[in-house]
Image: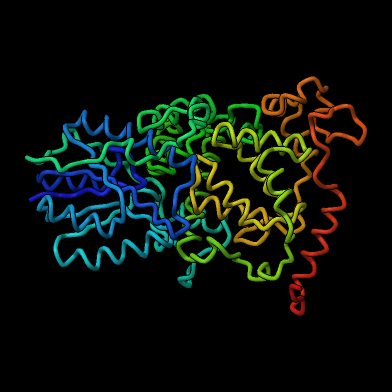
Amino acid sequence: MTVLVWFRQDLRLTDNPALYHACRTGEPVIPVFIDDPLPTSVSQLGSASRVWLHHSLQALTQDLQASGSHLILRQGSASVILPQLLAETGATRLYWNRLYDPASLQRDRQLKESLRQVCEVRSFNASLLNEPWEVLKADGTPYKVFTPFWQAMLRYGIQHQPLPAPAQIPAPAQVPASLPLDSLKLLPHIRWDIGMMSHWQVGERAALHKLLNFLPIGGKDYQQARDLPAHSGTSRLSPHLHFGEISPRQVVWLAEQFLAENATADSGVRHFIREIGWREFAWHLLYHFPHTVERPLDERFTRFPWAENHEEILIRWQRGQTGYPIIDAGMRELWQTGWMHNRVRMIVASLLCKNLLVPWQKGENWFRDTLVDADLASNVLGWQWTAGCGADAAPYFRIFNPILQSQKFDPDGDYIRRWVPELRERSSKQIHLPREPGENKQNYPLPVVDFKASREQALSLFEKIKQPSFRKT
């Protein structure tokens, strides 16, 4: 008798329920990862995320080997490969940890229904504090506003002691054949990824090390420092959470342990834990409203008259050539590191949707391809929040002024100077401002749009779609 453990976005040994319970059976355990990108769905990993996945699988392989096990790599449809592996190994149990995006949910339900005829199939929660169906309003409907959702989460309970990593993973007498990691071709042919990954350490150990370093150094001042892109005020745990190199339950548990010994850090660490709640809220929304992957939660925005010929301005935005320094700094940080500071994410998204009138889906798709932490639920929530068309959305009239935001959150211009080198010689006062016509700065573009005029246009359009009689022409 053998247990197959199907790894997905849970690339760790600690607090991995599927692996833990598989080892508890006392039977040989075969860990397997299937590169099944669901190419017809939105679940397909973007280019930056596939690079991270390569390195994360490499780290997981090493950790499994240290525990006496091997990671079996296969490629193709899980619906085809899992039955093949069951027959090949004679496994009588199949365990996995749940995913909550619409495409994976549909596939996993079909797999459970078909494979239960030949083996025991069990799934577990490894990526959320609580299941999306567990925290609901009194009438049984899902929350659409974060604050009452988080209050309900706190009442329900967010502290769960993480499961230990297995000391030893029982190995089968014969290990199935495995593809070499390189054969999955997760890395690009032109190695742009080398520079990007120089900014990161990948894997379960790196994730835990990052959290334990962040709590005493960044936790205390997190509430204020998290808004300053030039400072290391955030945990940068998002890609590790996305790939399951660390679980939210581990994060909250260790943060609470830290607070028990460091009461002075309470406000900052509490705010940090609340951000884990935002991630939870994102998956809660996507589970209950799966159409929001592609369509706005606020149906009025299906009538919104987005710009039709936006290809040129979209490219300028993607390349960090908008002429607004804080925007361009953020987009270049994204391109070079696979990550962008959260405050800047809101600023760049606001410009794209509300000033350039480019559909939020275009920005969400670009982030999904270029972010190493391209978590589907968080990405969709963030873009719909900024565009004003989602749950708990920023009011339609809230349009971030990139100049004022830059002056407030990067007052000395250090963030801009790092990512927009052609502006390094500007004074701290001038560095936030767009180039004026006639200014002798030919290597930096003029603004792609006039902020004031485009803001007024957006407000006018937002007012129109609020009217029931308005129809998109």
Single out the residue that lies furthest toward the front: 189
Q: Is residue 95 above or below residue 336?
A: below
Task: Classify residue 67 by image quadrant.
Answer: top left
| Viewer-side residue, 177 vs 407 | 177
Query: Would residue 264 be seen by someone viewing this image from the given angle?
Result: no
Query: Would residue 151 be seen by someone viewing this image from the given angle?
Result: yes
Single out the residue that lies furthest toward the top: 425
User: Where does the C terminus fall, quadrant-wise?
Assistant: bottom right
Determine whether, in the image, residue 400 is placed left or right of residue 67: right
Position in image of residue 190 (x %, y %): 49, 33
Query: At 22% from the left edge and 55% from the top edge, which residue is drawn?
Result: 82
Single out the residue that lies furthest toward the right: 438
Position in image of residue 114 (x %, y %): 22, 67
Query: At 53% from the left edge and 60% from the top edge, which residue is drawn?
Result: 293
Determine whether, in the image, residue 313 is placed left or right of residue 33: right
Position in image of residue 50 (x %, y %): 43, 41
Query: At 44% from the left edge and 28% from the top edge, which residue is drawn?
Result: 210
Task: Classify residue 180 by image quadrant.
Answer: top left
| Viewer-side residue, 369 vs 344 | 369
| Viewer-side residue, 107 vs 155 | 107
Position in image of residue 90 (x %, y %): 9, 53
Exactly how many numbered labels are in the figure?
0
Query: At 41% from the left edge and 43% from the top edge, which residue is drawn?
Result: 248
Coloring applied to the structure: rainbow
